[in-house]
Image (cartoon, rainbow, N blue to C red):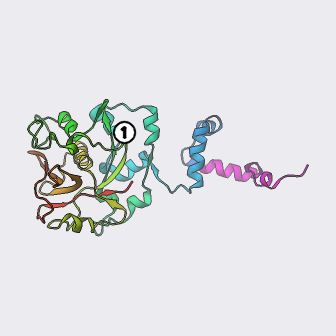
Amino acid sequence: MRSTSKQQDGLWTIRFGELGATLKALQDQGVTVKHLARLRVEPEYAKRVAEFMLQGGLVGLTHQRARAILGKNFFGVEEWSSLYGVNFSNKQLREVAEFPWSEDVLNAPCPFHLGKSIKETHFAFLGLDAFKGKPLTILKWQELHPDSGQPKFSSYAPDSWYAKEKFGNEPTCGFRWYLMPLEIVPESTSKTYAEQTAMLPADYEVPLAIEEVTKVILYYRKNGIYLNPTTYSRCRDVASDGDPVDVGYFDSEGLDVGSGWGDERHYRIGLAASRKF
């Protein structure tokens, strides 16, 4: 019986020696017979492995590998569970199993700090859209961190000026990974918003205030360090009076969420940034 071209190209045509060498290469990387068994009985698992191989293994990382690369600059599932008691469903864990930026990106030169890499100057964290069934807004963050401890806010609802502002009550982070510079964009102070955004590389965007707030809080919980203690990060949100929203001046007195400077140039107001997802 004549073989088809497809049959001739099938994996079953591999020589025994090549098969042995392939299995040894996998074993050297920690693959066991249990992993191979999963390939045979779990179609979705086999599909994910095949997609990774067909893409050349260059798209994304496992979040465990990202953690190993970023070290203290990483806040993921484990931190949410240990520090906030968050329980993730299997579906949620599958959704965030892959980290969206490659190892090459994390090791690449930082576009903001000469001589440093992105893994040194950026913070990666898993954003949550809800906390134990409630939207994780800025006001919800206030509930999670009252003024009796650290970190804390400089003011609290109902006294916070933004207690009734839309940006404080409605927006949440997406349930996804974020990669954001630790500090404001260098040399971005004393500029208008248009001048500041013109400084951003094509791979970056201006984050929402909730995203910037989440970043600085999670970094403090992980490392005990206040980010941007003497500057504000201008965000994408606009208050009801039309002024941009700023987040920063974060120290032991609390995280400040401000506005009121309009679009004027101010020596304490720089620009927040986030790597595009």
- Three-letter code for the amino acid on which mark 1 is drawn: Val
Which residue extends farthest right?
1
Q: Position of residue 195 (x, y in %)?
A: 22, 68
Q: Is residue 32 visible?
A: no
Tell me if residue 112 comes above or below residue 55 in the rendering: below
Q: Position of residue 128 (x, y in %)?
A: 33, 40
Magenta region, main secondary structure? helix
What residue do we see at 80% from left, 54% from top? 8
Q: Quadrant of residue 48?
A: top right
User: Foreground residue, 154 or 106?
Assistant: 154
Q: Residue under circle 1?
A: 77
Q: Position of residue 207 (x, y in %)?
A: 28, 53
Q: Please check the rendered image and state whether residue 107 is part of the magenta-colored stretch, yes or no.
A: no
What residue do we see at 22% from left, 55% from top? 235
Other residues around mark 1 within 10 Å, as few (<14) / some (14–19) / many (≥20) = some
What residue do we see at 62% from left, 38% from top? 43
User: Foreground residue, 74 or 177?
Assistant: 177
Q: Position of residue 35 (x, y in %)?
A: 58, 39
Q: Quadrant of residue 44?
A: top right
For the record, the magenta segment spans 1-26
Q: Secondary structure at mark 1?
A: helix
Q: Is residue 2 visible?
A: yes
